Image (tube, rainbow, N blue to C red):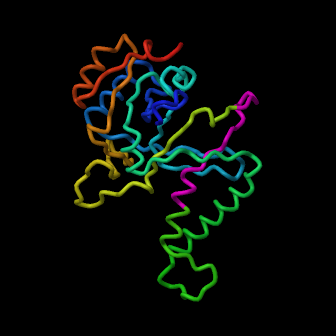
Amino acid sequence: MASDRKYINSSLIHWTGRDKNQDAACSILENICREQILRLTYCPTYVQENLKPRVAMACFTDIPLEHSHEHCSKFGQFGLAFNKQKMIEYGANPVLYTTGRHLDRIRNISNLLERMKDLEKDREWRSEVEPFNFSVDETIALIEVLGLLQEYSYKNDDGTDYVTYFQREWRLTFEVLQFAGGTTEHIPEMSRFYVREGISYGVFKFDKSDIEYIIAPAEYEERALDAASMLGCNVKIYESEVNC
């Protein structure tokens, strides 16, 4: 049982509040609970010369709460715990970390994908006997797999190494999710584009039952309890759960 393995969290935690003050971070958590959506953000998966692919995604981690202090110092102290099995059914997957030894191969695959996308644009004009004729499903499959790749580590501005592997990231990407386009009802497990203040962005909708609990600092317990009441879940206090 995964719950017996203390080095793995049985839930997937989406931490929020990166680069925000605590009040702003709490407001983000409240909005997530109220709307039952996660905004998909474009994140770079490689930070290399001539290789900076960006993927629209919602990110999670399965680091146990008690070992989350370092992670939260970067990503915030407010979080939602998602049921891991439900998220797997939606399409969530552990990130596939690749070391520098494989960088040239990743560049080649990334370049191949761009060529495949270009070929898709003119599919109706191409001959079926043309060499390197890729099907739509093959192109989509490669897009989905590449969306799960992540650089194992990269150099900080000060020259030190930042090891992304320690984030134990899981990822739910826009390409994997079913899309609620046009007049299709936006139901849980589906993505769509929202427009707020003139800005369009992709979102993922979840169900109340997908949330097992939310996490917040003690100072924000009252607001967290109000937010949790929207989802019918419990609240865990950051200082009580995370070894600081």
Q: Residue at x 51, y 58 (%)?
A: 144
Residue at horizontal 39 percent and vertical 44 percent from the top: 87
Which residue is at the front of the view, 190 or 96?
Answer: 96
Identify which residue, 115 or 148, lies in the foreground: 148
Above/below status of 89 relative to 136: above
Question: Where is residue 27, by image quadrant?
Answer: top left
The spot of residue 74 in percent (x, y) is: 55, 26
Q: Image quarter for residue 234? A: top left
Q: Position of residue 211 (x, y in %)?
A: 32, 34
Query: Does the stretch in magenta take in 36?
Result: no
Residue 69 vs 7, above or below: the answer is above
Q: Where are the magenta residues, as a range?
A: 143-161
Number of numbered tags placed on the structure image? 0
Residue under the image location 73 percent in, 51 percent down: 103
Give percent across and percent down for residue 217.
40, 15
In the rendered view, tell whether residue 128 sits above or below residue 152: below
- Picture coordinates of residue 107 (x, y %)? 69, 57
Image position of 146 (left or right of 98): left
Specify whether 242 is left or right of 112: left
The residue nearer to you, when weighing 5 against 33, is 5
Q: Is residue 28 left or right of residue 70?
A: left
